[in-house]
Amino acid sequence: MSQAKVDQYKKDKKNRKQIMAKEKREWFLTQAAVGLIGAAIVVWIGFSAYNVITAPKDTGAAETVEYTIDSSALTDYLDTLSED
């Protein structure tokens, strides 16, 4: 081995605890982030399914609304036009 490789190995061996702690910390944070994203997706799907299930059902019978209009004034006006 070259001297540079030996020096790098000694440096890595000296800092091995810190390197391993950093790797474990990064792994834990990655797993926590993936878990939170997964939980958010599951909650979103559950909420959407709940909204679909509890939505009011359409019975197919539409409610009809009737309006009455007094058109006597319009009829009187049209009658005066046809007389001329």
Image (tube, rainbow, N blue to C red):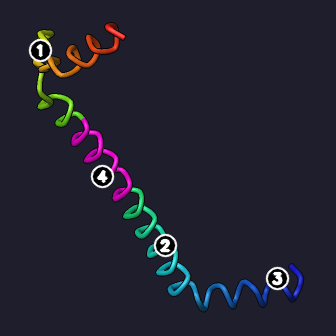
* Coordinates of residue 61 in the picture (x, y in percent): 11, 10
Specify few, some or many for label 1: CA neighbours under 10 Å numbering under 14, 14-19, or 20 or more. Answer: few
Task: Give the total number of marks visible in the rendering.
Answer: 4
Label 1, label 4: how far apart the Cα atoms are: 45 Å
Which amino acid is tagged 1?
Answer: Thr
Q: Which mark is residue 39?
A: 4
Q: Which mark is residue 26?
A: 2
Specify few, some or many for label 2: CA neighbours under 10 Å numbering under 14, 14-19, or 20 or more. Answer: few
Which amino acid is tagged 3?
Answer: Lys
Specify few, some or many for label 4: CA neighbours under 10 Å numbering under 14, 14-19, or 20 or more. Answer: few
Which amino acid is tagged 2?
Answer: Glu
Which residue position holds label 3?
A: 5
* Coordinates of residue 51 in the picture (x, y in percent): 19, 36
User: Quick one: label 2 or label 4, which is nearer the N terminus?
Assistant: 2
Q: Residue at x 29, y 14 (%)?
A: 78
Q: Nearer the viewer, mark 1 or mark 2?
A: 1
Label 2, label 3: how far apart the Cα atoms are: 26 Å
Residue sitting nearer the eye, 83 or 46 = 83
Q: Nearer the viewer, mark 1 or mark 4?
A: 1
**SS for tag 1?**
loop
User: Quick one: label 3 or label 1, which is nearer the N terminus?
Assistant: 3
Which residue position holds label 1?
A: 64
**SS for tag 4?**
helix
Label 1, label 2: how far apart the Cα atoms are: 64 Å
| Stretch in magenta | 35-48
